[in-house]
Image (spheres, grey):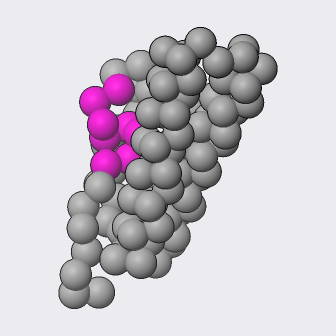
């Protein structure tokens, strides 16, 4: 792959509480586009939630929208972890990439 945009895993984003070693994640343009599209959609949903709260909308409507935002962010997280797993398997077949315990911690951080 000639064009890859670097991205950070949850561990590499500076979250000291995750307790993970940092491993750079490189997404191919298709994966990057998909992740960014999901994040932008979630960003719009968050703006909608803010507007709903400011406008005094019904609590049930706000909670429903919050659940959609949460699900969208979870999907982004799982997509990033899946990309990381794929990268580890294809670029580090010798096992020098992220180990099973690190991947498990990432999955559990989204649970």
Magenta span includes 78? no
Depth check, front residue: 55 or 61: 55
> Which of the 4 image quadrants contains residue 2?
bottom left
Q: Residue at x 51, y 70 (%)?
A: 86
Question: In x, y percent, where is residue 9?
Answer: 38, 47
Residue 45 in sight in this render: yes
Depth check, front residue: 81 or 40: 40
**23 left or right of 38 in image:** left
Identify the residue at the far bottom of this view. Answer: 2
**94 left or right of 22 in image:** right
Question: In x, y percent, where is residue 91?
Answer: 39, 75
What is the span of residues highlighted in magenta in the rendered image? 8-15
Vertical placement of residue 17 versus 3, above or below: above
Q: Residue at x 55, y 58 (%)?
A: 79
Vertical placement of residue 79 versus 56, above or below: below
Question: In x, y percent, where is residue 101?
Answer: 56, 42
Identify the residue at the far front of this view. Answer: 55
Question: Looking at the figure, which quarter contains the N terminus?
Answer: bottom left
Identify the residue at the far right of this view. Answer: 60
Q: Residue at x 35, y 26 (%)?
A: 15
Question: Looking at the figure, which quarter contains the C terminus?
Answer: top right
Question: In x, y percent, where is residue 13?
Answer: 30, 37
């Amino acid at each position: 792959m000639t064009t890859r945009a670097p991205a950070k895993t949850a561990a590499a984003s500076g979250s000291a509480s995750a307790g993970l070693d940092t491993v750079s994640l490189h997404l191919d343009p298709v994966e990057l586009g998909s992740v960014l599209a999901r994040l932008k959609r979630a960003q719009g949903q968050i703006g909608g939630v803010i507007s709903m709260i400011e406008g005094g909308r019904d609590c049930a409507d706000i909670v429903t929208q919050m659940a959609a935002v949460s699900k969208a962010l979870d999907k982004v997280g799982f997509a990033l972890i899946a990309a990381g797993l794929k990268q580890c398997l294809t670029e580090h077949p010798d096992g020098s990439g992220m180990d099973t315990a690190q991947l498990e911690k990432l999955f559990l951080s989204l649970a």
